[in-house]
Amino acid sequence: MFLPLLATIFGAPLLQDVFLHFLTDPEQIRAGSMGFAMRLGWFCCAVMALRSYTALVRGPERAVLDPHPGDPKLLLRYLTLRCASENLVLLCCGIAMLWPLAWAGYSAEAAVAACVVATGWALGLLIGFPVHLAAVWAAESRALSNVLEALRGANPRLQAALIYAPGVVLALGGAGVWMASQAGLLLLADTPSGWGFLLGPVVLGALAWGLAGPLAGGFHYKTTMVLAEIDAHYARLEDAEEGKIVYLQWMVRFFPQSLQPHLLKDLRHGWRGLRTWVLGAWAAGVMVGLSSVSDDPQAFERSLALAGAALVAVASTGLWLGIRDPKWLDTSLPAHPQERLRARSVAVFLWLQGVLLLGAIGLGWRHGSSEAWVFLAVLEGLAVVLAVGASRASRWREQGWSAYLPGALLLWAGCLGVLT
Amino acid sequence: MTAISIRGLTKNYGRVKALKGIDLELRPGELVALIGPNGAGKSTTLKLLTGQMMPTSGEVFVSGINVQEQPGEARRLIGYVPEEPALYDYLTAREFLEFIASIRGVDGVEEALAFTELDADGERLIREYSQGMRRKTALAAAILAKPPVLVLDEALNGLDPPSAVRVKKRLRELCDEGACVLLSTHVLDTAERLADRVVMISEGAVVVDEKLDREAGSDLEALFLERMPRASDD
């Protein structure tokens, strides 16, 4: 918990020019701080929406406890408390992002902004559990089957309800965070009614969580059935031949013979086991590209910030590869550990290109080649360091997170701080 | 009342018909072996029976409770040992059983440890256990609440021979006390020695449902080869 918090405390001043640029204009402090707090609150709400989904729907508890059903309401309370305690670091980091505001002498603004961030975190948690349980009801509901059929896209109908549930949490929680930020403006203008608006969303969130108990009684155990149906649907879509194709496999021939077997193993492992991350690099690249296609003078900084964050996230595939490696590789086949780690760095670096290429094209098209080259030069350097760092940290398996995450966040913040 | 009642159970995975209409009635006190080749539909049947999957059609009742409509209530009546049990690796077997006992509101940890003969290793972390000991821990957890129905999915695999003998003996004792045990296994010998009745599934359908005469001895292997087209082809 302390390492991400320390990384945020040291990184926040480096990110000041991107996120807290309003500090230079006293006229903009209130609106700027509430706007920043609102975005941080939305981010915390989105993360908690996903974390509550994982805790309740896809968490490890389900497999262990399903054969031994206890009281689902008690289980819900436990999962809520555990989700809250495990993600307390997110709230602390969100609030720590505001310390430059307090340091600059705007402590009242910082305190109110912290309340807005906490509102987002709390709403993601409190609304998340009832909404995810209600999604199971919606998945089974005949009345909603036509709606889900229309919304499901390529997914099975049952999955559609679960896919959209975090979005519903974010929409409801986002509205609450917006309300809290408006309440913050009222409070900073010495309007006491702001307290009511600030506390209102959290009270509504707590009431929503109260609905989760009865919903858990009806739907916690049905969730397992819904998940089994969804998994079975995807299992039969999997084409055995398609699964053998490995993204970037053709690249292996360009690398030294000693790296090739390890590189191919990691590419196969990543493509089959971490495909969401690997393809997510290109999705992040599209977002970076779109953010760079703008005449806004902030577009360069924004693209850098977004691409850097995406690099930090996607490079964590290096760690996941280490965590998922069978332990006997270390004990029974300890040969060539350096080649293994070098090959892993190469695999991760190749996957990171998805983030960078589209952003560079967007910047080059709209802002000229010089900005695109600066973008590429800096972020390719960051990609190399992150790929090597994540791969080296993967030696320590789960403990590698403690080394990788704070280091990567500080590097990202440092790059932004230096360049902006 | 029957312990387990399966009526017209079908399960389709897209075009693949995993179960093609299974009907079974299991009574309290019966020990029934469910056998069949890989992919025959045994695990699907057990998952539907334990409320982990929705049937395409048909119904499953456990002690009169519809599993699909009330999965939580039905599961409280079932002790289930999955083929690959998920356990908390950083608890000892005793701590794990105490935790399960507390959430189910029952006692009997010592009895369950004795049943599976884990007493001596009860203080070791589960992560240090062999596959067989993990299965024994899952079995101990499954019998803690003394459920009227026990469903074991390949639960005797990985047990060393002395443990397997003792567990089989204890399972028989449970049946004699009125529990219904449904045991899925690949091992014909286990089914032959242990079960009162054998149900063979092949290609999603029940092809044999017969009582076994353990005293007189039954030639289950011959029956298996006769009724299982794939096995006899091999």
Image: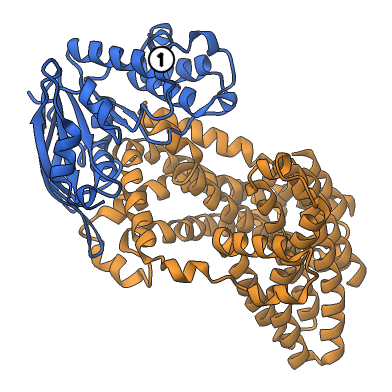
Chain colours: A orange, B blue
Residue lying at the far right in this picture: please name it. Answer: A418
Viewer-closest of B12 and A72: B12
Amino acid type for the residue under numbered disc 1: Pro
Q: Quadrant of residue A373?
A: bottom right
Q: Is A145 on the left or on the right of A156, as rendered?
A: left
Say which residue appears at 72% left-offset and 45% top-offset.
Answer: A333
Q: What secondary structure is marked by label 1?
A: helix
Q: Is residue B159 left or right of residue A29?
A: left
Q: Is residue A204 visible?
A: yes
The quarter of the picture where the C terminus of chain A appears is bottom right
Query: Considering only vertical position in the picture, is B55 above or below A293?
Result: above
Which residue is identified by label 1? Answer: B162
Rendering coords of residue A274 (x, y %) = 58, 59
Left or right position of B97 against A5: left
Q: Chain of mark 1?
A: B
Name the residue: 13% across, 43% down. Answer: B226
**Quarter occupied by residue B76:** top left
Q: Quadrant of the N terminus of chain A?
A: top right
The percent coordinates of residue A272 (x first, y second) are 55, 62
Nearest the eye: B9 or A411: B9
Residue drawn at (44%, 40%) of the image = A209
- Give the image location of residue B229, x and y in percent: 17, 51
Label 1: few (<14), some (14–19) or many (≥20) C-alpha neighbours in 10 Å: few
Q: In x, y percent, where is residue A98?
A: 78, 52
Residue A181 shows up from this direction:
no
Above or below A276: residue B70 = above
Q: Residue at x 69, y 69 (%)?
A: A351
Q: Is residue B89 left or right of residue B192?
A: right
Please tell me whether residue A216 is drawn above or below residue B148 in the rendered image: below
User: Between residues B180 and A305, which one lies in front from this camera angle?
Assistant: B180
